Image: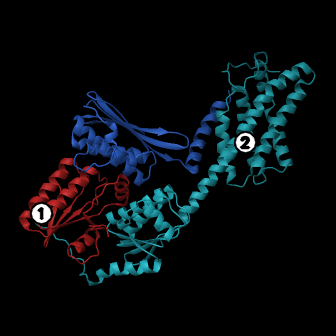
Chain colours: A red, B blue, C cyan
Amino acid sequence: MSVPILKHGDYLIASIQTALSDQEVLGLRDDLAERVGRTRARGIVVDVTALDVIDSFAARALGAIAATAKLRGAKTVLVGIQPDVAMAMVQFQLDLAPLKTALDLEEGLAVLQGSGGEAGGDGR
Amino acid sequence: MDDEERIEIGTDADIVEARATGRALAVRLGFSRTDATLIATAISEITRNMLVHAGRGTVELRGVYERDRHGIVVVASDDGPGIRDVELAMQDGWGAPGSLGLGLPGSRRLMDELEVETTVGAGTTVTMTKWRSRDTPERLRDQRGQQEHEKERAWR
Amino acid sequence: MSHDTPSLPTSALRPPAADAELLPKLVAYLRQMRTDLREEWARRITGEQLLRVMTEEEIFSEVTAVYDNYVDALETGSVETLQAYARDLSERIIRRGVETHEVLGIVVLLRDVLARSLFLRYQEDPELLERVLNSYEPAANRIAVTVGVSFVEERERVIREQQAAIRELSTPVLQVRDQLVILPIIGAIDSRRARQLTEHLLNAIQANRARVVVIDITGVASIDMTVANHLVQTVTAARLMGASAIITGLSSEIAQTLVDLGVDLTMMQTVGDLQGGLEEAERLLGYKVMRDDAPSVTATA
């Protein structure tokens, strides 16, 4: 398993450490799907701080992670998108909606716990 | 300092190499961090297209040095099936069902120039370029270096 | 009289064929007279009170470089090296306050100094003198124009860059309180500035851990489609970093423009004035007050 997935109470935290190849991205998607099912986690935080590029493939995979999690009753929050990556995504017109996003791990967990003012979702 | 690179694309790990090499070259050419990310993202899209539709190909990266601007040129070429309808490919809708999803319009938004040459059954070449202007202090430094050189040659 | 005859490519500076042999002789003569003529030129520059911002040593140093480049240009017929030098010189002296009339003045003085020297040299033979001047004049004039134009172009470029720098400095991102930043935008925005502002804002979101950004456009008179799109992009990018954006200070004109342009206003939250926007921001952030402290992360098998 190339991306470490940690359990934190009712939540899973997937912390991406390096640039991922397409296969590794798909591997993460499958790993998370399996873990959510097995652990009955209520939420996932995917930390993409280390990703220097988020392209259409990665965006689709992240969307798939959230969709699968949702089927199993879990919310997903994406954290750690860097300023230059965010710029590239909007210029490319990559839309991650309805994925929720937060600044970092701390904020992401707050969103999952329902007490953070969240961004993403329907855009507000 | 190497400002020409060539990467053979055969696996998805090569996509990572292509964009990392592209980013490094962009930085050497003096592009900002943000622009380097735009360039790396465009390279990622185009390279994946090539891998998915043609199975393999090459990506060439080259620095261009003009007096008032520097640029990076990315040429991705393959011997794949070609693109039947380039205009359609240049329209948005990468994620929508039924769309070609080639990421070409997005890449064009990230870069300054993007051209597609394709022949059905023979292959495709995508050439894209991004420029950055050079400011006065930078050009001054260059002129200095060149002037010293010229002075040595001027008198015979 | 010296007889250098290097072989040279032809060019637009070349006079008619018969006089083409003359130019190398003139060039050789001008090189021979180099010391005297440079000094005379420098004297005349100071005498006419040009380049006053420069010291005598500096003037002499530049005079030497220009003289040599000038004579080279006469010889080779190519102004490229001279152009490059002129731009370099311009970049240096523009920032010191040297003005256009001074630059044109010194170039014209050099042309005169050299012309008079040629006159003195060949005045015994009027026919030869005429051929000499026919050879010299077109080339000298072209050089004067080249240097003048290079200077003016450089000056315009420097002014543009300075204006851009001022624009960049004039929009800070303010952190007002914990997790809230304000970006007040004032004046005209073009595409390039809009991109800079967005970068600025996104970096500020990260540095200040902002969850709400208030973008105040009270100071913006009007926007076009390009800028409106940049605004939408900025809001989207902020959202990707976990921050909600509130646009404040929308005039009714701008609001109408956005509607006319088909911008999806549901994509962004707008409030009439900055005060209202700040209140809304505080309301959004108010959720934080009820939060637990951030828990620590533990690894599991």
Q: Extreme right residue here? A: C124
Instruction: Give left or right: position of C164 versus B70.
Output: right
> In this view of the protein, which residue sits in the foreground, C169 or A119?
A119
Instruction: Give left or right: position of B69 versus C207.
Output: right
Q: Quadrant of residue B10?
A: top left
Question: Which of the two marks, 1 or 2, is nearer to us in this view?
Answer: 1
Residue A4 is marked as: none
Residue C268 is situated, as x and y percent measured from the top left of the image, at 37, 68
**Which image quarter is the N terminus of chain C in?**
top right
Identify the subunit bearing mark 2: C
Q: Extreme left residue here? A: A38
Badge 1: few (under 14), some or many (20 or more) residues near its Cα, within 10 Å? few
Residue C283 is situated, as x and y percent measured from the top left of the image, at 35, 81
Query: At numbered mark 1, what does the secondary structure look like: helix, strand or loop?
Result: helix
Identify the subunit bearing mark 1: A
Is A68 drawn above or below residue C147 in the view shown? Answer: below
Q: Quadrant of residue C159?
A: bottom right
What residue sits right under mark 1 in the picture? A71
Viewer can see residue C67: no
What residue sits right under mark 2 in the picture? C148
Query: At numbered mark 2, what does the secondary structure look like: helix, strand or loop?
Result: helix
Q: In percent of the image, x 39 and y 75: which residue is there?
A: C180
Q: Label 1, label 2: how many angstroms apart (C-alpha)?
A: 73 Å
Q: Amino acid at mark 1?
A: Leu
Q: In percent of the image, x 83 and y 48: which residue is there?
A: C46
Badge 2: few (under 14), some or many (20 or more) residues near its Cα, within 10 Å? many
Q: Quadrant of residue C108?
A: top right
Instruction: Give left or right: position of C12 versus C288.
Output: right
Q: Amino acid at mark 2?
A: Gly
Is B61 drawn above or below residue C263 in the view shown? Answer: above
